[in-house]
Amino acid sequence: MIENLKSLITNTEDSETKTILFQILIRIKMLEDNQLSEKQLSGDLLKIYKDFLKYKTSTNLKSYDYDKDAVHIVFGGTQAGSIAQMLKNQNLLEREAVISFDERFSIGPIWNLHENEGIQHRSDWIVNHINLENEQLEDYQETFIKKIDEIKSIETKAKIVIWVGDNAHEQTALLYILYTLKNHSNEIQCIHATKDYQEIQPGDTHVPLHIGEMLPESLSIIYDLHKNSPALSAEEKKVYEDNWEYLATKTEVLRIWSKQRIQHVAENYYDDDILAVISHLHNEQKEKDFIKASRIIGELLGCIEQDIGDLYFEYRMRMLLFQGMLEIKGVPKAWRYYSVRKKEYADY
């Protein structure tokens, strides 16, 4: 059982791990604030554990039955788990399905992504720049195309519900999927969960970056708010489609969410932040020693309020190595295998 757990955790994305950790910590905080009893905490932790096992062991085996009343589209495994749990809590899993497009749309080329040449272009960039597992690299383009075909295969009678938050990843994905579905007659509803969350939790100082950071109980309230909301009109769909056509002309490989819109920025946009974090960690050392890449990326994920992901930061750290600004100890096949320090401290 321990080995199985190790295998599941090894194949879990950092975003999923962070979400599980957040759900655990928020419950501990509720215990400290006397909002939860120890018995309730124990029950909640056991439920998180069981839900994690059930979701991870079924991810690669699940085949969706699209003969449903509604199909929910989300953009990440963590988000899919949260929505699936919400539907389960409402006894809706028999009638509603979840599709997860496990892709990071805030990074990588999206130029002409609605055409085969755009998918090929993105695939080439990902394979040549991002440290994915060998199997993911080999199957990247095929997996991407299969997911698009999966979404296109949703039956016309099913209502499509697309969940997004205020981040460049999900907002870019929303435009892409709506363009992909532009010739489909399905009723389509978009739920901007971040905005709704702030309305139902006005006193919460933590604003989730994406729906995977929200508790299923909050998602249930948000879903209930929208059950009678109108579907997108033809005019609204056209606006989204036009926005995608504009976005798909861009050649940049990094997007952020700023002033309530997607903004393209330079590939090295976060390089100064990476160097600043490394300097800060060096200042905590008596001797300027090598720092685990995982710790640096963890600090970046904690202080940069964008849904960029660990893999892009790791890529930029390697670029700084190649530029001679950092030196390395270990093998840069993935961020957990090496450490870095600023080149100026090489003689320490």
Image (cartoon, rainbow, N blue to C red):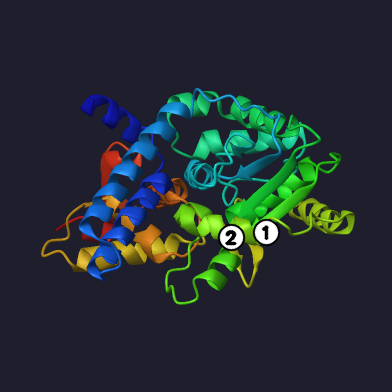
In the visual, does 98 lie left or right of 328?
A: right
The amino acid sitting under disc 1 is His
Q: Residue furthest toward the right?
A: 235
Q: Is residue 123 above or below residue 344?
A: above
Residue contact between numbered discs 1 and 2, judged by CB atoms under 8 Å: yes
Q: Estimate the x, y position of residue 128 in percent, counting from the top left.
A: 52, 35
User: SS of the residue at dot 1?
Assistant: helix
In the picture, the disc for residue 226 is 1
**In percent of the image, x 62 and y 57: which residue is there?**
224
Q: Estimate the x, y position of residue 290 in percent, counting from the top left.
A: 20, 52
**In percent of the image, x 83 and y 43: which residue is there?**
182
Quadrant of res 289: bottom left
Q: Estimate the x, y position of residue 284 in percent, counting from the top left.
A: 18, 67
Q: Considering the image in quadrants, where does the N terminus appear? A: top left
Q: Estimate the x, y position of residue 101 in percent, counting from the top left.
A: 59, 39
- Front residue of this view, candidates 159 and 180: 159
Q: Residues within 10 Å of mark 1 (few under 14, many from 20)?
A: some
Q: Considering the image in quadrants, where does the C terminus appear? A: bottom left
Q: Which residue is mark 2?
A: 222
Q: Is residue 39 above or below residue 93?
A: below
- Front residue of this view, candidates 141 and 99: 99
Q: Is residue 29 above or below residue 89?
A: below
